[in-house]
Amino acid sequence: MRFYARITSPLGAMLLSSNGTHLDGLYFDDQKDMPLVDTGVPAKPVKADPTAGMMAGTAIKDFRAYKKTAQPDLFSSQNLDATDPTSRNKRAAWDTAQSLIIIQPNTPDGALKVFQQTLGELQEYFDEKRTTFTVPIHLHGTDFQIKVWQALLAIPYGEYVSYGDVALTAGLTAQHGRPVGTAVGRNPLSIIVPCHRVLAGSGRLNGYTGGLERKFALLELEGFTLA
């Protein structure tokens, strides 16, 4: 049985799922592959195209990521408007949201502990106080998908790789780039399994199931400038 909870984040509401002992899902609430769960809160329209999105008149998928030394500003008005035009005070909303919304009344203590740890670690991540996650996770998918997702876990904070790099880390060949891209897009644990750190070979953002505005913001948070 799976158990669910809902949290807020600077980049929008998120759905968490647990098998009772491990976190096995973390989705933005407008992701196409988010489980259909009655959370009591109307979901936002699903993003139909993970490569869509514009910023400053340029397609976000065509932005390139570069290392920078200046401190990132995830909470700039530009990024906040891109992810949720109805809110200009996301940092305040995150700082005061210290509780979980538990979906099922019979959620066991093990799942509650996992949800609380996930919330705490995500808060630290967005506050730039955490670069790795320790919440126990369970990856459920095909053997191929799990190989790819495990390769994603090896990408360090503040670095990015290409789809071909992920293929090689997973024990495949660079020619597996396309099926690897499909598996990356099916990642069930946004942020924690860092699929946002996978870019096209040219350094372009390319696509992101959670929406390219969020990929842009996450890369900025981790120390990149994008142009």
Image: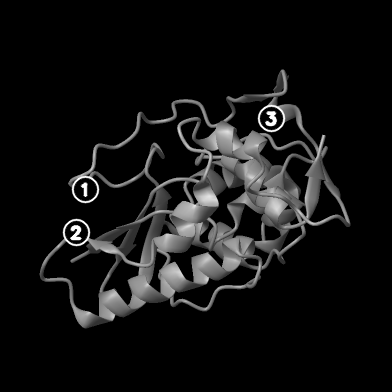
Residue 129 position within the rendered picture, expressed as x and y whole percent measured from the top left: 64, 72
Q: Quadrant of residue 114?
A: bottom left
For disc 1, the marked residue is 37
Residue 167 position within the rendered picture, expressed as x and y whole percent measured from the top left: 68, 54
- Which kind of residue does numbered mark 3 sit on? Lys
For disc 2, the marked residue is 103
Q: Can residue 173 be seen from the camera position used here?
A: no
Q: What residue is drawn where x is 27% and y is 75%?
A: 112
- Horizontal relation, residue 222 to residue 107: left or right: right
From mark 2 to mark 1, how far is it between C-alphas?
9 Å
Q: What residue is drawn where x is 59% and y is 66%?
A: 125
The N terminus: image quadrant: bottom left
Scheme of image coloration: one colour
Name the residue furthest top.
Answer: 57
- Which kind of residue does numbered mark 2 sit on? Ile
Q: What residue is drawn where x is 53% and y is 32%?
A: 50
| Sequence-first tag of 2 and 1 | 1
Residue 138 position within the rendered picture, expressed as x and y whole percent measured from the top left: 40, 70
**What number of labels is visible?**
3
Q: Which mark is residue 61?
A: 3
From mark 3 to mark 1, how far is it between C-alphas?
30 Å
